[in-house]
Amino acid sequence: MKSKIYLYLFVFTLLLVLFMYVNSKSIIEKYEKDITTAKERVERYKDSITVLQDENSDLLYFNLEHNEDALTYFENERIDISSLIPFLKDELYKLNEVKGEHPLVPYVSMTDGKIMINNIKFLNHKWIIADFSDGKYWGELFLTYEISNDNQLTYKLVEHFLYPPQNY
């Protein structure tokens, strides 16, 4: 009787060990698969980050804030660079408040709205690209600007266009 108990105990222990082995093996395989998937995802994200950094670098190429030559020009003219870009933007946006038609946009509003400059991009120490809209029609401007010795800002419209209306 005692030997049968030992035999049953041995068989039960063997089955328990076998069950634990199979269970832990499946858990380890699942973790290895998860780790492999995570490593692949990390590599894919690293590639995506690299692509985004390259795109960002391309977008910043024509940008006053990242153009060392243009910034050096303003430093040589003794113009405070930290307040320059907000000043330039404020001056352009102030033109939106002028009564009547916009002084820089060569088009008359074709709706009840007023033509206003919406977005501005300073390319360098002389050039600006801006877009304008009256709520329905929109276009873009290419401007030059100059800051005189007495801090007077002057604009010159170089090129402009109005997008054709879209029928949806």
Image: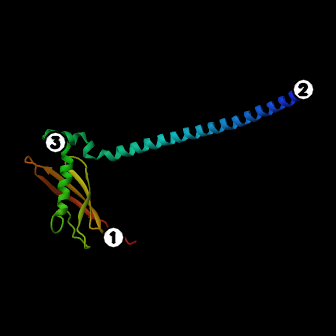
> For mark 3, does the 10 Å Cα neighbourhood hold few (<14), some (14 to 19), or many (20 or more) residues?
few
Amino acid at pointer 3 = Asp
Q: CA distance from mark 3 to mark 1?
A: 42 Å
Q: How many marks?
A: 3
Residue ID for mark 3: 80
Say which residue appears at 90% left-offset and 29% top-offset: 4
Earlier-in-chain disc, 1 versus 2:
2
Say which residue appears at 43% left-offset and 44% top-offset: 51
Residue ID for mark 1: 165
- The location of residue 160, given as percent across then percent down, is 24, 61
- Of 114 and 51, nearer the camera is 114
Amino acid at pointer 1 = Pro
Say which residue appears at 90% left-offset and 26% top-offset: 3
Tell me if label 3 and label 1 are in contact, CB under 8 Å: no
Tell me the mark number nearer the camera, choosing from 1 and 2.
2
Residue ID for mark 2: 2
Q: CA distance from mark 1 to mark 2?
A: 97 Å
Q: Which colour style is shown?
A: rainbow
Quarter of the image containing the N terminus?
A: top right
Earlier-in-chain disc, 3 versus 1:
3
- The location of residue 19, given as percent across then percent down, is 76, 35
- The location of residue 72, given as percent across then percent down, is 19, 39
> For mark 2, does the 10 Å Cα neighbourhood hold few (<14), some (14 to 19), or many (20 or more) residues?
few
- Of 10 and 163, nearer the camera is 10
Is residue 55 rendered to the left or right of residue 116? right
Amino acid at pointer 2 = Lys
Helix, strand or loop status at disc 2: helix
Quarter of the image containing the C terminus?
A: bottom left
Say which residue appears at 19% left-offset and 42% top-offset: 81
Q: CA distance from mark 2 to mark 3?
A: 97 Å
